[in-house]
Amino acid sequence: MHEMSIAADMMDQLLRIADEQHAVRIVEVEVICGEMQQVVPEALQLAFEAVTVDTPAAGATLKLSEERMVANCRSCGQRFEPAIDDFLCPHCSAADAELIAGQDIVLKSVVCEIEDEAAKT
Ligand SMILES: [Zn+2]
């Protein structure tokens, strides 16, 4: 499952962040899914719950938002929003576009509970 490998990659990043921040718990994770990745939000949510079991991110809230694809036409220089199966430039019909947004899964923000703060409360 595509979403499972995305969740596993996210988990690697989360553990690194938790380690750097000396976090005892990860509370909330905000992720931007590029349209090109064709992520099914429900599937990613389930995969996330599966990979976070017995980790500091267990029970964390996962916020997903999708980023539309944006392409830059190399032929006429115009920007446009391509469809997943149609990368032709609507301005000059060239099939020579460079994707400049919407292709990646990006960890936008992570809310952690830090050790010291936990001790205070
Ligand atoms: Zn063009």
Image: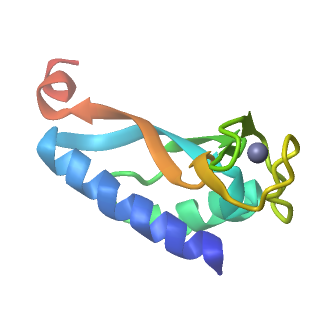
Give the residue drawn at x 44%, y 45%.
107
Please say whether residue 53 is visible from this viewpoint. no
The quadrant of the picture showing ligand 1 is top right
Q: Could you say where residue 2 lies in the image, as x and y percent from the top left?
A: 63, 76
Please identify the residue farthest to the top as the structure is shown.
120
Q: Could you say where residue 90 lies in the image, as x and y percent from the top left?
A: 88, 44
Front residue of this view, candidates 29 and 59: 29
Quadrant in which the N terminus appears: bottom right
**How many labels sit on residues?**
0
Q: Quadrant of residue 108?
A: top left
Give the residue drawn at x 81%, y 49%.
89
| 113 sits to left or right of 70 | left
| 90 sits to left or right of 2 | right
| 111 sits to left or right of 99 | left
Front residue of this view, candidates 110 and 37: 37
Give the residue drawn at x 41%, y 66%.
9
| 53 sits to left or right of 39 | left
Q: Quadrant of residue 72?
A: top right
Please say whether residue 33 is visible from this viewpoint. yes
Please identify the residue farthest to the bottom as the structure is shown.
1
Q: Could you say where residue 28 lies in the image, as x and y percent from the top left?
A: 46, 36
* For residue 37, above or below residue 70: below
Front residue of this view, candidates 56 and 19: 19
Q: Could you say where residue 32 lies in the image, as x and y percent from the top left?
A: 57, 43
Give the residue drawn at x 54%, y 43%.
31
Quadrant in which the C terminus appears: top left
* For residue 2, above or below residue 58: below
Q: Quadrant of residue 100?
A: top right
* For residue 55, above or below residue 59: below
